């Protein structure tokens, strides 16, 4: 699957979001990965299959309380992470690519523990049912 992508780059500084990332993602369908800027640990992989890649990604940083209430991954500091984007032509491609990237990047979390690759869960964390 051929995609347009943007490599690991900063998402925000103390005053604004990265205009290059915003321009690349706005109105697009695709997949995003978020990693810690210092440790390089991949924290989350998600997708937008409805041409809202930028807005979907931002909700994890701006919708702290509402996302926490439904068990979605959130992060309080967009200035401490980097993002990587893959733009796809269709929503089906985004869903398929998200699965591939989750396997490849083994994020700390993706749509709740049940969707995490088994080998990325903590040993004391029970397998989801």
Image: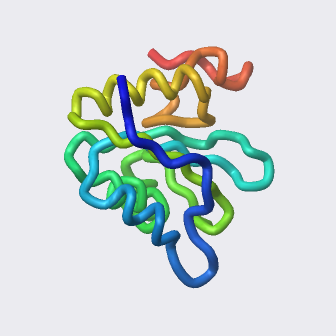
**Who is closer to the viewer here, 109 or 81?**
81
Residue 84, compared with residue 121, is above or below; it is below
Placement of the C terminus among the 4 image quadrants = top left
**Who is closer to the viewer here, 86 or 125?**
86
- Farthest residue to the bottom: give it: 15
**Who is closer to the viewer here, 127 or 80?**
80
- Determine whether, in the image, residue 61 is placed left or right of residue 3: right
Give the total of numbered labels: 0
What residue is rendered at 79% in x and 54% in y? 38
What residue is rendered at 50% in x and 27% in y? 101
Q: Position of residue 80 (x, y in %)?
A: 68, 63
Q: Position of residue 24 (x, y in %)?
A: 39, 57
Q: Position of residue 75 (x, y in %)?
A: 56, 58
- Determine whether, in the image, residue 109 is placed left or right of residue 23: right
Residue 17, compared with residue 2, is above or below; it is below
What residue is rendered at 61% in x and 43% in y? 43
**Who is closer to the viewer here, 75 or 9?**
9
Placement of the N terminus among the 4 image quadrants = top left
- Determine whether, in the image, residue 50 is placed left or right of residue 18: left
Q: Quadrant of residue 86?
A: top left
What residue is rendered at 74% in x and 45% in y? 40
Q: Position of residue 117 (x, y in %)?
A: 56, 19
């Amino acid at each position: 699957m051929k995609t347009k992508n943007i490599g690991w780059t900063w998402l925000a500084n103390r005053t604004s979001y990265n205009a290059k990332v915003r321009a690349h993602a706005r109105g697009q369908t695709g997949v995003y990965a978020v990693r810690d800027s210092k440790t390089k640990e991949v924290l989350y992989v998600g997708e937008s299959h409805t041409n809202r890649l930028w807005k979907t990604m931002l909700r994890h940083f701006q919708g702290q309380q509402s996302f926490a209430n439904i068990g979605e991954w959130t992060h309080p500091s967009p200035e401490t992470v980097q993002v990587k984007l893959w733009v796809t032509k269709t929503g089906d491609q985004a869903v398929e690519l998200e699965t591939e990237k989750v396997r490849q990047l083994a994020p700390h979390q993706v749509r709740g523990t049940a969707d995490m690759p088994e080998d990325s869960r903590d040993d004391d964390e029970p397998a989801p049912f």
